[in-house]
Image: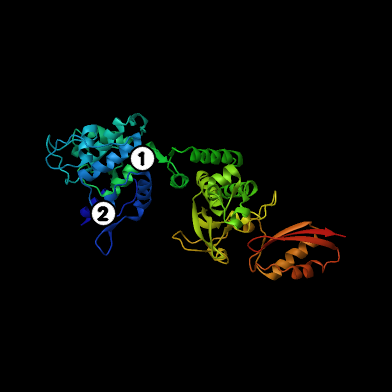
Amino acid sequence: MQRAIAIIIMVTTLSSVSVSWSQTVSAGGASQPSEWAERDIQEAEISGILPQWVEGRYTSKITRVQFAEMILLLYEALTGQRLEGPVSNPFRDTRNFYAAQGVKLGLMNGTSKTTFSPDLLITREQLAVMLYNTMTITNLKGRMKQEALPAFADEEQMASWSQEAIEAMASGGLIQGSVYQNEVYFLPKQTTTIEQAIVLVNRIHKQFGKLKVGTEKALLTAVQYGLTPSITDTRVQTIYEEAHTVLAKIIRPGMSDYEKELAIHDYLVLNTVYDEDNYNQGTVPKDSYSAYGALILGIAVCQGYANAANLMLNLAGIEAHIVTGTVNGEAHAWNKVKLGGEYYNLDVTWDDPVPDIAGRVDYGYFNVTDEELRQDHSWKDSLPEAAATAFNYYVMNGLVAESREEFVDRINRAIGSYDTAITIKRSYTREKNMEELKAIIFSHPIVAGFDCVFGSGGVLTISLRYR
């Protein structure tokens, strides 16, 4: 039993991820992807290197003909070439386009001159050779890393025709061995699963390939997943370049993620006007729904704010997502960001005063919890709950009043210090009760008058004048 367990442990580390051989099977018998493979599968699908047939087969062993399609899709993505049929097929046992094309390109060989053995399971050493051939034929071999090569304890099990490929792929960090009892094993004769092959192919594409992008949606998706976009549309290229230009201006070395998020938030609020007139008339143009409107034209509605924020946040290395829902029964969009391992809601649109007030930035919806946001927003999503408060703007700056008593005390202390302005976030209410505020402030004879701006999220800013 101990030996069997050891083999399982070694096999599961085909890629540099921790892999479990326990299968998740649906009621219909189809296997679901393992948690460790989900992101690579999503990225591969976005990149166009995920065959359609993988659905429900993730933990199944991969065959030669299945890997042939996967590796041909990788070849197309790496070269930008679209392989077209028909192609001469010398095989008697398959008419598969990818098998014939892969052999023609030199990515793989048949098992004989007239057979491909399409249903034969592929071994790790065969997989290494095919991937190495792909790197060679696409002229990417020279870009592979050359790190110290581990001494594989099972090197004698490798076929002579596979050793060069295994060494190159292993030293390049693209295929790894497994450690057992202080020795590294490659397991050249072992087979692999479909999801393991996807992880490996996706790793190569992320390091050496580019994702063709022709729409704003595709750009947002590529950037969110850390993929390098190859942009084919002039308008999208303009958005991408402007986002980089803005970030270069507002992000300084040494900034924390919170400071980067704050800089992006403030830039959008200060440089974008909400397209109120068109919204009220039902004539909102397409540009106002896009990052192009926010970044290039300086006018947008919620979707434009959310798209621009998502693009810049992800480019700045901050995980961000777009959330859609409703406010007062009308469609709305905002962002959910991850800081310090926790999630927060960010609604840049609702922090931009309407009508626009030059130089004014609100923070009522800067990193708020789901509970707080649900006071006026409604939505359903599968993202993690936002329950943390540490990076809320007002918490970070010590401006939160948790009760009416604390609110009154803060105003009293500000007036006692002759402060001319005070901003407070009332977490206990969002009421805009001017009469109550007058009673609190004018209980101090030294106050001659005041102005108050009620912001979003229970925030108010008071300007004080003294006798």
**Which of 28 and 307 lies nearest the eye of the viewer?**
307
Residue in front for this viewpoint, 105 or 396: 105
* x, y percent for residue 387: 53, 62
Residue 280: x and y, percent? 61, 57
User: Which residue is the site of mark 2?
Assistant: 57
Whether residue 422 can be seen here: yes
First reached walking from the N terminus: tag 2 or tag 1? 2
| Secondary structure found at label 1 | helix
Q: Is residue 105 left or right of residue 391?
A: left
Residue in the image at 23% along x and 34% along y: 163
Residue at the location (60% across, 53% down)? 278
Q: Which residue is mark 1?
A: 205
| Kind of residue sitting beneath label 1 | His
- Nearer the observer, 2 or 89: 89
- Left or right of residue 267, residue 4 in this image: left
Check the picture and name the quadrant holding the N terminus: bottom left
Question: Seen in the image, is 261 located left or right of residue 464?
Answer: left
Q: Where is residue 460 drawn, in percent x and y? A: 70, 61
Can residue 12 be seen in the rendering of this structure? no
Quadrant occupied by the C terminus: bottom right
